[in-house]
Image (cartoon, helix red, strand yellow):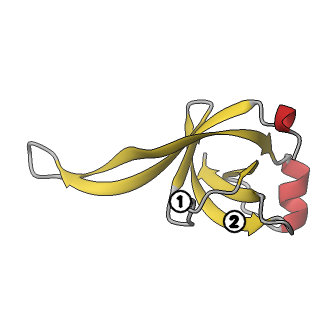
Amino acid sequence: MRSGRLRDSVEIQSKSRKKDSYGAKVDEYSKVYSAKADVRYMAGSELIKAGVASNLIVITVLMRNDRRMVEKLFIHTDGQRFEVENIKPSDDKREIIVTATRET
């Protein structure tokens, strides 16, 4: 992997349900770890070809492989939170490509 490609900062987060002071359940996100990555937004035409709903924003994230990355986590980048959908390791297991989505 060429390290110069990892120009974006991402924060990997986990979600938990907590009760607020009124007793209502609210989602709380906490940091698992931070990483450098190459974040790419999928174009609308690519989403249509793939048959993905038009109300989704889909990103692919190239980053170094880390055992803490699992599909139940979230990626926070550019002020937006994306749910991890798929994790694909490279052939040499040194990097991963993560696909994540967010509803608009």
- What amino acid does circle 1 point to? Arg
Toward which corner of the image does residue 4 lie, by quadrant?
top right
What's the mark number on residue 87? Answer: 2
How far apart in space, not on screen, are marks 1 and 2 (Cα)? 12 Å
User: Where is residue 24 drawn, in percent x and y?
Assistant: 16, 52
User: Where is residue 51 drawn, in percent x and y?
Assistant: 82, 68
Question: Where is mark 1, residue-wise?
Answer: 68
- What amino acid does circle 2 point to? Ile
- Looking at the image, which residue is at 10% across and 52% down? 23
- Residue 68 against residue 9 in the figure, above or below: below
Looking at the image, is mark 1 or mark 2 earlier in the sequence? 1
User: Where is residue 65 drawn, in percent x and y?
Assistant: 69, 57
Label 2 residue SS = strand
- Residue 77 against residue 57 in the figure, above or below: above
Label 1 residue SS = loop
Q: Are marks 1 and 2 in contact (CB under 8 Å)?
A: no
